[in-house]
Amino acid sequence: MEGKAKNISFQQFEITKRHRMERNKHRSFVLWVTGLSASGKSSIANEVEKQLYARHIRTAILDGDNLRYGLNNDLGFSMEDRSENVRRTSQAAKLLVDAGLIAIVSLVSPLRSDREKARAIFEQDEFVEVFVDCPLKICEERDPKGLYKKVREGKIPEFTGITSPYEHPENPEIRVISDKQSIIESARQIIAYLDEHHHFSWEE
């Protein structure tokens, strides 16, 4: 395709992901938090990071709204743009994981196929999908940004869960029921899973 970079080669460097994980004393991976708007993704991601920070674990959050101010500010909300949004975010997360950090991605990422493509760029056990499960009715009642109201008024033409599809994860590593438990409880559930499956352990 015209415009794509040519005559390039992948550079190898001496300090690797393994060196960085060894320095940090914990593994690196991506925690991919998906769910409807207002399901609680960003709040849960924030609480997970706070709890991990207290344990001296190095993290970085990639939040969907924040990314649209910078990296993804040229994208709209068509299905093609949503897929590109996921692709770019997954590549940014991979850079963080290669840097030895735990990347916490908070992104609607509505299509299973896009999330599976994101998973595919990581090594085995480096992609942990968290489904923040919350009924559409509850999300719409919460509506902290007033988006659902605008959708019902016809001011937003493409909105996930109403006028645009959201495909629930079929086999997420973690399923959080965010209308039945608090943000802190949800974060503790996620971290308990990661502890149980030795996602933080680092052997000298």
Image: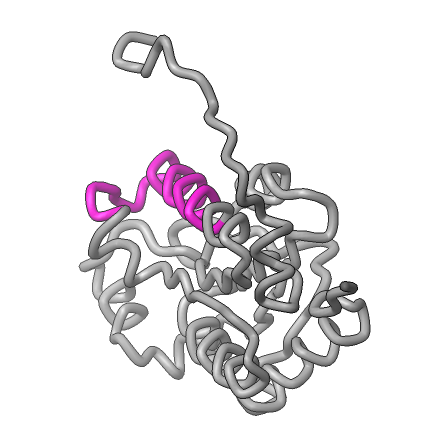
State yes or no: residue 76 in magenta.
yes
Question: Bounds of the magenta span?
Answer: 72-93
**On-image quarter of the C terminus:** bottom right
Quarter of the image holding residue 181? Answer: bottom right
Task: Provide residue 54's location: percent of width, then percent of height.
Answer: 53, 87
* Secondary structure mostly taken by the magenta-highlighted segment of the chain: helix
Query: 20 or 50: which is nearer to us?
Result: 20
Residue 112 position (above or below residue 102): above
Task: Provide residue 43's location: percent of width, then percent of height.
Answer: 44, 80
Task: Provide residue 66's location: percent of width, then percent of height.
Answer: 28, 62
Query: 93 or 134: which is nearer to us?
Result: 93
Q: Is residue 110 visible?
A: no
Query: 117 or 58: which is nearer to us?
Result: 58
Quarter of the image holding residue 168? Answer: bottom right
Residue 137 position (above or below residue 174): below
Q: Residue at x 47, y 53 (%)?
A: 96
Task: Provide residue 81's location: percent of width, then percent of height.
Answer: 33, 38
